[in-house]
């Protein structure tokens, strides 16, 4: 009811406008496109950190690696995105450049949180200044800094938090409820993969198809990317 | 009544527009989002200064330190925010950079008020120029300069005042009334913590849950950050 | 009547638009916020110049010096503002920087009128260019240059005049009428303080409360700032 | 009739828009504010040039020299303005800077027409570009270059003409008619002052009050500024 | 009919908008203001080139040379304008600067067409870019380059053509018809002046008044400017 | 029908807006002004390339060369335009500067296609960015590079194609149909001129008047420009 | 239904606006113009990669190579576009410059994906920032890097994927279905050409005309471009 009034009054036409109740409606709309995106889950484990991502559909014309939404930022950081894929690609490219610049300048890997913070700052600016729309994308970053695994998620507003486990995209709320039930801090990456796929099975029911999943695993100082049945066998 | 007229006439669509009664409605709307934020209290004590912040809810998936709204600006300054968290993060980062630049340039810590003034200036600009929305965030800064504790709060407009004790976020007016009753200038940080938690208990009633509180304490030249039951035991 | 027509036609939506009768309505609206501000009076005396300012309410949580609206620009210039306090703070800070730059460049104090002119120029620009709103603030500047006291007031449009005595904020017109009756050019600062407080008593009636007043006195080459009962005893 | 249509169609909302009949209505509106301003008259004489300006009202709180609308640009140029006083102050300041720059660069006084042309150019730009409103001010410049007196008037559009005698502000058309009747090219400044005050008396009738007039007289290589009864005695 | 539809749909509000029939209405409106301007005629002769300009009315308060619309650009180029006089002054000043720059850079006079092209380019830009309105002025340039007289006219759009004889301002179409009848390429400047005044007499009928005309004559390497009865006697 | 809906919804007000069916209506409107322009034809021949252009009307007051729409870009490139003549002049001037810069930099003539591509790029930008309207002009470029004649046409969108023969302006579609019938790749310039004039005669019927045509012929390393009856005799 | 509501509320007027359901309608409209474009197919083969493109109609006045939509970016990369041809030309030119710069800087060919990513980034920006419209063009890039053939398609949003085989333009969905049926990874370029032409025949039915097709074939380190019957004979 109030939403329709807000729309008729035009409060939802610009990122630079607060509605009378203090909401920024353009940002809320952008969050909807994220919720339409396919689901991903990230989990911190005692021996690493994992991200599992669901492809909505498998298109045999597309080269698999190209459709995989899990991307490397640096040797020790991976990211998965939900929402507008072209927006995500731009932010991923920026993150890569920032990581490279850090390596060149300091001769050491950038910290995961530093990358997350820079990307989040960019996102925030696009919710405050006119002349552009917000980035319609949520992201989970997983990294290992000095052997310590970590997981961050940034939303459309540019806010970010450090997680033990989290989810973005379709059904993210339901998935988080399952994670709260099942997550244990002493899980191995193997156990976490199993738990994650179990949650997907529960949520997707008959639509569940192992062939449509990609996983990124950060452990023992390297990134392992596997897909489909390889995930079950890991 | 007048508000609805103002809305229909469009006086509330831009930060650069005064309503016929001289109000800037976009700024007033931004203040509402701040009032929806969780509550924080700051108190100057004879032996230091404290900030206590309420997390609305505890999410076991989020790493605690990440959800803590009390942030360090420098070794002698902390800040807590209420409102849009991504906006707050940007301002906190700016404050940190300003503090570092001061250390590098003058080889001495920046004064708390100097940081507050710079952040407030930035906020003011975003209420006067077009091309952006105001920062939807109020902040309490606590600092110790040359062993003198101080407390400042900046609102959405970029105004700031120096306080003995104050509150931002949900129920800030009620909390301030309680503070006026109970605050004494000769309180120790320990006594102030107790008083503060008492006020939260009174205001929140049955919803009060010690586990959802974080405290930042500046005394004896260092910052102490504690949470939940640690606050009661301090 | 004509005002309502102007509003319906939208002539009052931008600082860059003249109404058909040549008025700039956004500026007039900004002047209203100034009239809602608390009152201040400035008086030139034979031995100096004074500013007296009324705080609307006394909040024991606020540190007194922080709520005092009388601010120093330099060793020989003080200012008081009425309207949007964050706007005033920005202009005061600019004035301070200009005064310091003058000292550094010429090794002598800047003249009061030169500071007033620069601040007035800034204000004028914000009533002529788009992309920002006018500064919602009127200011009284008091200064002593080469032992000659002077008093200036700038309004929202950026116009300024040199006064013997004047007032800004709530009831400014009534106060000016009283000043015309009572002001004498050969008053001492002591006499002027007395006259001023008398005028406030007359205007405010039962609401008058000496505790809510601050005074700034420029005489004998220094600034004296006093508050409440100290004013009566001066 | 056509004006109301133009208003309803919105042709009068921006300086950058021609109405269907080729008029620029924002400029016409700005001209109205000039007509509301108090009247001034300028007259070229055989032995110099004079400007006489009417103050609408005398406010004993204002220092006289501050309310005087006749301003010096350089040792040999004076100016009087009608319209928005803060706009006028900005243009006068620009004119002064230009005159000083000329002295510094060429070690000789700038010509009056050169100053007039630069100020007129600035005014024209503000009637053609968006992002600002026109300067709401007309000005009479009087100067003596190489012993030759001259008089110029610039209007809101930035057009300027060289006059023998002219008027701006309230009743300018009526005053010009009187000037056409009475002006003779061989008048002395004394005779011209007398003629001018006579015209003001005729136009203002009972409201005429010698105390509300200021005069600027350029003769014998210097500027004389007199007010009120001094004008009659000159 | 179509025009009213265009106006109601708003196609005529900006220079950057084509109407559905491909017209740029803001430019057409600007052309109207030119047609309201007083008339001028230019004629190329075998021994030079002339411009004759009509002043609408004679104001004895205005110094004659100031009201004369025929202006020098350089020793060998003159120009006359019709439309908004402040716009014309800006373009004339630009033309003068360009001519001077050419003399300084190449130590030779600039060609008339080169000046015309530069001014026309400026005019075109103001019909294509947003952020400004078109220049509301048409101009006739007359020049003699290497003893060859030439005549150019630029319209509001920034188009320009080289003419044998042409007219701008009020009644330009009627005057051009007369010119087509009477113009001969072997006319002397004297004969052309006579023909031109004859055309004005025919067109203006009873309103014709020789005192209201100015002429500029380029012949024998110099510019002659004459007015009123001097034209008849030339 | 759909067009009227598009207009009422405002899809046709800006170059930066796609209509729901993917059309850019402002560009389509600009194309209409081109269709109102007079016709031109270009033909590649075995011994060169020709352009023939129709002047709508012959004005004896205009110097012929000035009304000729066929312009030289360089010694080996000519161009003809249809649409807004001031827009065309700006693009032609840019093309000339580009050609000169190439000669200066590389000491060799620029290729015709390179010039066409640069001009087309500029045109494209004006259909994609806001802040300006598209160039309302189509152009045929004819050039001879290393003895090879070529012909290009650019439309309003900035698209360009290489032609054997083509037409722009009024009746361009009908003329192209005739060209498809009659064009042979082994024509001489003489034969092509004859064919072209034949097509004009057919299309214009009684309105055909040889005096209103200009031709540009590139053959034997030089440009020949002829008009009216000279075309028939060539 | 919802679309019409979105249109009436104006959510589809700017690229910088999300509709309440999170869609960016201006981008969707731009995608329609792409679907109106003629069809192209790309296929990766075991011995190379091919692109086949359909010209809607054959115009004998246009030089064939100019109408061919298959363009070279570098010795090892070709591209075909569907949508607004002037937009495509600008992007192709940018790609060429990027490829040349890489050769000059690194003395080695740029990778196909690197070019695709840069062009996709540019496209993304035009869907996020105001002041321009999106590029109305989809593109298929085919390249051979170190003897490995690859195929990419970028859409209007700036998203890109790596394909085994894909299609853009009219009937792209139907063509992709056919490709999924018939594509085998071990096809030779010859077999792929045959398959592709077979699909076109099926889709176009009676309208199929071999003369309207162009093919680009990358194999054995070189680009072969053929048209019409040459495709059947390859």
Image: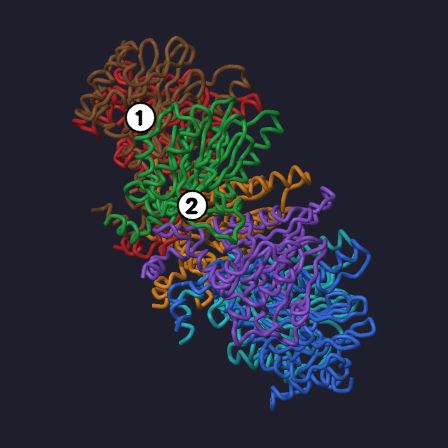
Chain colours: A red, B orange, C cyan, D blue, E purple, F green, G brown
Protein chain holding label 2:
F
Q: Is residue E212 left or right of residue A128?
A: right
* Within-10-Å neighbours for mark 2: few <14, some 14–19, many 20+: many
Quarter of the image where the N terminus of chain A is located: bottom left
- Please name the residue that numbered disc 1 is placed on: A53
**Res. A218 mark:** none
Q: Is residue F49 left or right of residue B103?
A: left
Q: Tally the numbered discs.
A: 2
Callout 1: SS: strand
Compared with B147, D215 (above or below) is below
Callout 2: SS: strand
Compared with C156, B202 (above or below) is above
Q: Nearer the viewer, mark 2 or mark 1?
A: 2
The image shows residue E21 at horizontal and vertical percentages of: 35, 51
Q: CA distance from mark 2 to mark 1?
A: 56 Å
The image shows residue D217 at horizontal and vertical percentages of: 76, 76
- Please name the residue that numbered disc 2 is placed on: F83
Question: Is B132 or A201 nearer to us in this picture?
Answer: B132
| Quarter of image, res B161 | bottom right
Q: Residue at x 60, y 41 (%)?
A: B99
């Amino acid at each position: 009811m109030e939403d329709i009034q807000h729309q008729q009054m035009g409060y939802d036409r610009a990122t630079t406008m607060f509605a009378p109740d203090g909401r920024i409606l353009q940002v809320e709309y952008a969050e909807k496109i994220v919720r339409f995106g396919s689901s991903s889950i990230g989990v911190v484990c005692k021996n690493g950190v994992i991200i599992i991502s669901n492809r909505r559909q498998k298109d045999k014309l597309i080269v698999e690696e190209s459709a995989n939404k899990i991307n490397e930022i640096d040797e020790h950081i991976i990211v998965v995105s939900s929402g507008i894929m072209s927006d995500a690609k731009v932010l991923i490219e920026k993150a890569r450049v920032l990581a490279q610049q850090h390596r060149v300048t300091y001769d050491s890997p950038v910290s995961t949180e530093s990358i997350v913070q820079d990307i989040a700052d960019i996102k925030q600016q696009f919710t405050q200044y006119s002349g552009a729309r917000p980035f319609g994308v949520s992201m989970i970053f997983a990294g290992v800094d000095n052997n310590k695994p970590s997981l961050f998620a940034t939303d459309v507003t540019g806010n970010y938090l450090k997680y033990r486990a989290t989810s973005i995209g379709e059904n993210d709320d339901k998935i988080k409820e399952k994670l709260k039930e099942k997550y244990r801090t002493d899980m191995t990456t193997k156990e976490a993969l199993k738990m994650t796929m179990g949650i997907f099975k529960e949520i997707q029911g008959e639509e569940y198809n192992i062939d449509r999943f990609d996983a990124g695993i950060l452990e023992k100082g390297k990134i392992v990317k596997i897909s489909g049945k390889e995930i079950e066998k890991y």
